[in-house]
Amino acid sequence: MNHELAGKWGVVTGADGGIGIEFCRALARRGCSLVMVSVTVDPLRNAAGSIENEFGVKAIPFTLDLTDPVAESMIEEFLSARGLDVDFVINNAGIFSFRELVETSEAKIGCFIDLHVRATTMLSFFFARRFKQRGSGRILNMSSMSCWMPMPGLAMYASTKAYIRVFTRSLHYELKDYGATATVAAPGGIATSLFGLPDNLMHLAVALGAVEKPDRFAEKAVKAMLKGKMQYINGFINRLAIFFVGITPTWIRMQVKRRLLDKGIVK
C-alpha cells in the first residue's frame, strides 16, 4: 500500500461487490477514502467495513437507487452534509441481459436507460462542474467492448454502453483544458456474476484469457484514470477483436440469434 492519494476522496457506484469493490480496493490501496454507493444495504455495509479493515481508510456506505430521477441531488446532499470534497468518481453501476428487445420488459428497458444513460450522465455532469471550477479531478465511466457489437440479444446493453463511450470521450476533451479528465473503460469479459456464467465455465474462460479477473482490470483502469487517459481497453486480444467484430458478417450474427436466443440457450 502507498499513500499517493492520502487525504483524497473517491465515489464509486455499484460498490458492493464484483468489479465495483475492486475499484474501491484500487483507490484505497493508494490511501484514498471512499463513499461507496449501491442499491443494497447489508452487502454494501459489509463491503465498506472490509475496505476500512484492510486499508485503514474511511469507507462510507451510501445506499441509493441510481435509477431514481433525483439520485444525483441525493448524492450532493450526502456529500455536502459531511463536508466531503471528492477528487475521483467511478460510475461503475450497471445491469446486463441477453435477450431480444421485444422479449424485454418495459421496466428493464427503462432501467438500462436510467442507469447507464441518465445516471452516468447526471453524475458526470454534477462532478465535472466542480472539477472544472477547481481545476482538478478524475472521472471514470464504465462502458464495454459490446459497444462495438450490434449483436442480437444485446440491443439495450450494447447501445447504452456505446452512449457511455461516446459521451465520456467527448467530456474528456471538454475537461482537458481545465486540469480535469474523463476516462472511459471498455473491457472485454470480466469474471464477475454480471453475465451469469456457471463457476466451471468462468474458471475456464479465465484460464483461456477470454475474461480477466476483476482485481487486475480495476487496477489497470484506475491507473489509466489517474494518468488522465481518455480510454482504456484491457488486453491486446480485446483491442484486436474490435476490428473483427466490426466486420462480422450478417450470417454469423443471425446464427447467434437462432442458436442462442431462439432456442433459449441463453436467457
Image (cartoon, rainbow, N blue to C red):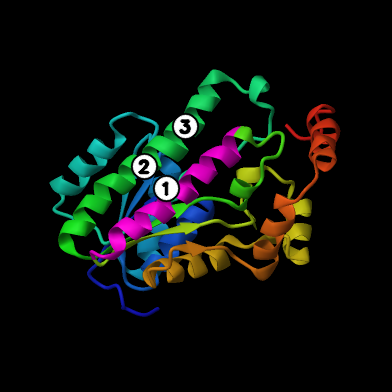
Q: Which residues are magenta?
A: 156-178
Residue pictured at 57% horizontal, 51% vertical:
144
* Label 3 – label 1 distance at C-alpha: 14 Å
Residue named by callout 2:
121
Which residue was labeled with disc 3? Answer: 113
Residue 16 against residue 63 in the figure, above or below: below
Give the secondary structure at mark 1: helix
Q: Which marked residue is nearer to the observer: mark 3 or mark 1?
A: 1
Q: Amino acid at mark 3?
A: Ile
Residue drawn at 15 percent across, 47 percent down: 80
| Crowd class of label 3 (few under 14; some 14 to 19; many from 20; radius 10 Å) | some
The amino acid type of the residue labelled 1 equals Phe
**Residue 7 x, y percent position in the rendering:** 22, 70
- Mark 3 or mark 2: which comes first in sequence? 3
Rendered-image quadrant of the C terminus = top right
The reply to whether dot 1 and dot 2 touch (C-beta < 8 Å) is: yes
Q: CA distance from mark 1 to mark 2?
A: 8 Å
Q: Nearer the viewer, residue 59 or 237?
A: 237
User: Residue flagged by tag 2: what amino acid is it?
Assistant: Thr
Residue 167 is marked as: 1
Based on the picture, tell me whether residue 159 belongs to the magenta stretch: yes
Q: Earlier in the sequence, mark 1 or mark 2?
A: 2
Q: Residues within 10 Å of mark 1 (few under 14, many from 20)?
A: some
Tell me: 8 left or right of 197. Answer: left
